[in-house]
Amino acid sequence: MTIKLPLPLPARRAMTRLGEDLSRARRRRQLTQVSLAERSGVSPATIKRMESGDTRVSLEALARVLHVLGELPRLERLLDTAQDELGLMLMDQALPKRVRLRQHSGAL
């Protein structure tokens, strides 16, 4: 049995901001919630929940909406491992101090 922890406040704020940004992007494109829902293949209720920052909206629904809005490449770059400063730093710390050639027996 797993215990569901409450969403950390910074994550809650990020979801609220994402919802607000999705709403703004939709309105800038002169789309109603219903038309965005139809074009993306999700329900109008899902669009409304997404724009309100509901954390239960699936990544699939988000990807569909971003595709319709022309913003799917931003999702693809969301966690670009080449730009992961902490991950790269941790990898660099684990590098060996020296690199030695392995001794081999001479048999091929």
Image (cartoon, grey):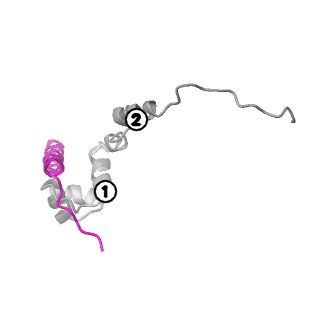
Between marks 1 and 2, how big is the CA–CA gap? 28 Å
Using a 10 Å C-alpha cutoff, classify the residue at mark 2 as few (fewer than 14 neighbours), some (14 to 19) or many (20 or more): few
Toward the viewer: 23 or 29? 23
| Prevailing secondary structure class for the magenta stretch in the rendered image | helix
Residue drawn at the location 20% of the way across and 59% of the way down: 55
Tag 1 secondary structure: helix
* Mark linked to residue 59: 1
User: In what quadrant of the picture does the N terminus appear?
Assistant: bottom left
Question: Dot 1 surroundings within 10 Å: few (below 14), some, or many (20 or more)?
Answer: few
Q: Position of residue 78 (x, y in %)?
A: 32, 41
Q: Which residues are magenta?
A: 1-30
| Quadrant hosting residue 58 | bottom left
Give me the disc on residue 29. Answer: none
Q: What secondary structure is marked by label 2?
A: helix
List x then y, in percent, for residue 2.
29, 70
**Which image quarter holds the C terminus?**
top right
User: Residue at coordinates 41% horizontally, 33% vertically from top-left?
Assistant: 88
Q: Which residue is mark 2?
A: 90
Task: Say whether disc 1 or disc 2 marks the residue closer to the N-terminus.
Answer: 1
